[in-house]
Amino acid sequence: MTTYDDRASLTDLTAVVERVRGSVEGVIEGKPEVVRLSLTVLLAEGHLLIEDVPGVGKTMLAKTLARSIDCSVRRIQFTPDLLPSDITGVSIWDQQRRDFEFKPGAIFAQVVIGDEINRASPKTQSALLESMEERQVTIDGKTYELPSPFMVVATQNPVEMEGTYPLPEAQRDRFMARVSVGYPSPEAELQMLDVHGGVSPLEDLQPVAHAHEIVKLIEAVRGVHVAEPVRRYAVELVAATRTHPDLRLGASPRATLHLLRAAKASAALSGREYALPDDVQSLAVAVLAHRLLPTAQAQLNRRTAEQVVQEILQRTPVPAAAPQQSGFGLGRGGPGYGQQPPRRL
């Protein structure tokens, strides 16, 4: 298991994240929770789905996060006529060499921005499945590895809008978390007029972290300790979605894994070497809700997946912290857990 060498190394890594956070929040005003979730997904080696109405800054958030890191960035504008080969690449016959030459597609970048992903057909959307899960592309029987770190930040409009295709369940399940930017507060919108009213702040945005620093952060997050009761708590939350009467499709085992990884990243962002039940609770809606399908009756009753997850959080007992135990955690001790009643959020 990867572990932190000492407290100073954790502080140094946290400083890198703070630089990136400050850079993004300088462009995306009044949305600190959205920025934190984006960084959590990045450090957890996940992919982020940003869903909201047009004009609230979905693409701006994706671009700002990408430009804050000194790494390769590609943007894909999803349209109905986009082909899978436009994303993954294609083999072209070279007359001089008398052989096929592979031309990489837009997916071959460290940060890939998929703008309005649900305006492309499901066939084109499926071109991302292998890349997002296995971080590789297979063309004509040959496999090509994608660079590290690798993250897909996709934006989509609500499915009720014209010209959109619902994302297939398998595609949604590849995204670690879904976030809605939402409308800004009047104060934040007024500040936005001052910042964005003239020149776009993206033009002057400079990278504040290198790709190799992000790789070190990811390795550090892998070493965050998760106690057995906290792991069991995550499993119970996900299992509850599979038996809930208002859901016809619950969360997959991949969702459990994503929830655990995101909880580790959240703990690292808070400067901790161990995850808490609070980390799991704070991320449950963002990680689970977009994977769930309500029943027809629940939809008639206007029950959303987010409401169901909140209800499950209320009903599931939370592990209670116990006195420190020697040897627990990453060699420094940490909280043990018993059981306590559900915590009201």
Image (cartoon, helix red, strand yellow):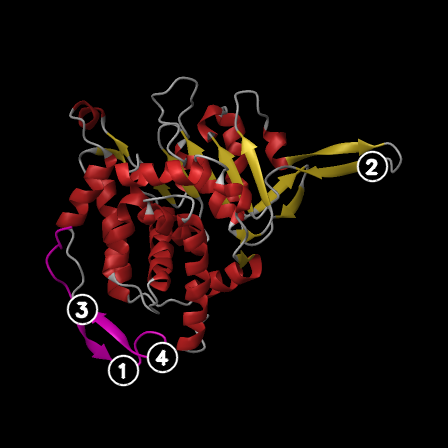
Report the Cα–Cα distance between label 2 and label 4: 56 Å
- Which residue occupies 31% across, 80% down? 327
Residue 315 rendering spot, x and y as whole percentages? 13, 49
Residue 236 rendering spot, x and y as whole percentages? 23, 52
Q: Say which of 131 and 16 sits in front.
A: 16
Report the Cα–Cα distance between label 3 and label 4: 18 Å
Disc 4 marks which residue?
A: 331
Magenta extent:
321-345
Q: Which corner quadrant of the image does residue 274 belong to? A: bottom left
Magenta-span inclusion, residue 327 = yes
Q: Which residue in the rendered view is the most extreme toward the bottom?
A: 326
Q: Earlier in the sequence, mark 3 or mark 4?
A: 3
Q: Earlier in the sequence, mark 3 or mark 2?
A: 2
Q: Which mark is residue 99?
A: 2
Pointers 2 and 4 in contact (C-beta within 8 Å): no
Q: Which residue in the rendered view is the most extreme toward the right?
A: 96
Report the Cα–Cα distance between label 1 and label 2: 63 Å
- Which residue occupies 41% across, 36% down? 58
Instruction: Residue type at mark 4: give it.
Output: Gly
Secondary structure state at the residue bearing disc 1: loop
Q: Say which of 212 and 174 sits in front.
A: 212
Q: Which mark is residue 66?
A: none
Residue 300 rendering spot, x and y as whole percentages? 18, 22
Disc 3 marks which residue?
A: 321
Q: Is residue 229 above or below residue 153?
A: below
Q: Earlier in the sequence, mark 2 or mark 4?
A: 2
